[in-house]
Image (cartoon, helix red, strand yellow):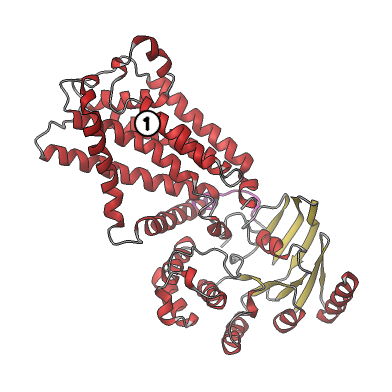
Amino acid sequence: MSGDARGLPALEAQTVSLQDIANAITVQCRVLNALILRETKTRYGEHKLGFVWAFLQPIVMVVVIYFIFSAMRTLAVSEIHFSVFVITGFVPFAMLRDTMTQCQGAISQNTALLGFPQVTTYDLILARALLEVSVLLVVFGLMMMGAGLLGIDVRCENPLGVLAACVLLWILGLGLGLIFASLTPIIPSVRQVTSQVLGRPLFLTSGIFYTADSIPEGIREYMLYNPVLHMIEMTRSAYFYEFNSIYASWSYATYSAFGTLAFGLVVHRAMRKKAIVGL
Amino acid sequence: MIRLVDLNKRYRTSAGVRVVLDKVNITFPSGKSVGILGLNGAGKSTLIRIIGDAEPADSGKVYSDGRVSWPLGYTGGFQGSLTARENSRFVARIYGENTRYIEDFTYEFSELGDYFDVPLKNYSAGMRSRFAFSVSLACDFDYYLVDEALETGDARYREKFRKAFEERKARASVILVSHNEETVRRNCDMAAILQEGSLVLYDNIKEAMQNYKILQTRIV
């Protein structure tokens, strides 16, 4: 019974046994499972077509980008169909941006759930991040299938490489999400900062509809400070036989993703008590 | 038993630092229902939230030898946009109970009828607490933490809860916070008073009532 309510250890249990660890993991999985199901329900369950919309929205975005930027097609790689090029840019980018924005509201929109001792702020954030990345991975697959059905070449050179790059984008988004989730309950205006000051410029500067190679020389070295640009280049290098970025640096991308995550955890740790009480 | 060891908690408000708990050491015995009395703003809800691990204390520890409920109150723990059925399933999942059983028990016991499938935000305060109590009863805790809410609902329903708690007393205890002496007198075997950061437990409920009366008149 002792391991059941996390944070309320039994009087006798002064040392941590393997059993305790196993219990803690079970509780963790139960909580994440319950939260993800709940999150799915609240986000998509209100309308009959809610879940369809979750998949439709990124597809619509890709189609819109495709038509708006098809004039700039020269900035992409000529051997690759521009639609697939946009998909490999936008969907991985969404794994960063949507994870970040979803995590941001995770605490402020779910305070009531913190009344349950098993549910921690980490669980709330992680549940949303996991749901987001799962939906987007399915969306990624569906879009490629759709493009394939239209007769476009969608062969993937290195699926694991694509997955690794996407995971890095997700981790970066999770790290940023942790920072903003800790700050929004205390400073509500942070919400605007993420969508306006961070989201939009990142959308334009991260190589969603162009390659790093097509950026003018003088600007390129500055734009390469943006780790998202590296990660999207990495995704495409892994995906396409015809494309290999000479600018993308896996080590720079990895360091920034995990560095941000570590920083996010530190910020969250420092602000957690305030963030809960501030509500 | 539930034991609080060196518990400290203070809030910084615009009016200065407010001490809610000042090095509180207390043991609540098993099988006894304890009522914690305190004037409005004494920090009763904070205390029960700390015991239930819903809020961190500044320092100190809470130990327990059984399963402790979440703090039961008017709203705590539930998402307004979800129905009672969905919320009961959520509770079942995080406590690792059988979803079907919890759902059915809550449905039967809460007597909410068709409202069981209506989002909680459309509930009255009485219906909300009816739901909260029913789910917690379904989960079979060793300690029930109750925040004032016993007083809601009609008399017949209140009686039903009382009976259900009474039946469990051998196995389960209640820790209840209230500013109302009547609630404590009716439901508890022992009483404690929370005042200016200190928590004093009285074996004799009469003595606690007397001291609480003195406290009330002194403030007025």
- Residue B76 image offset from top left, x and y in percent: 57, 65
Q: Amino acid at mark 1?
A: Phe
Q: Is residue A143 magenta?
A: no
Query: Residue B19's image quarter?
Result: bottom right
Q: Is residue B166 left or right of residue A163?
A: right
B14 or A138: which is nearer to us?
Answer: B14
B88 or B100: which is nearer to us?
Answer: B88
Q: Determine which residue is flagged by label 1.
A: A203
Residue found at the very far top of the displayed protein:
A218
Residue appearing at x 57%, y 74% in the figure: B125
Please tell me how crowded label 1 is: few (under 14), some (14-19), or many (20+) other residues with Cα within 10 Å. some
Chain ID of residue with mark 1: A
Which range of residues does the magenta coloring cover?
A13-22
Residue appearing at x 36%, y 38% in the figure: A95
Q: Is residue A194 left or right of residue A92?
A: right
- Residue A114 image offset from top left, x and y in percent: 56, 56
Residue found at the very far left of the displayed protein:
A151
Residue appearing at x 29%, y 52% in the figure: A53
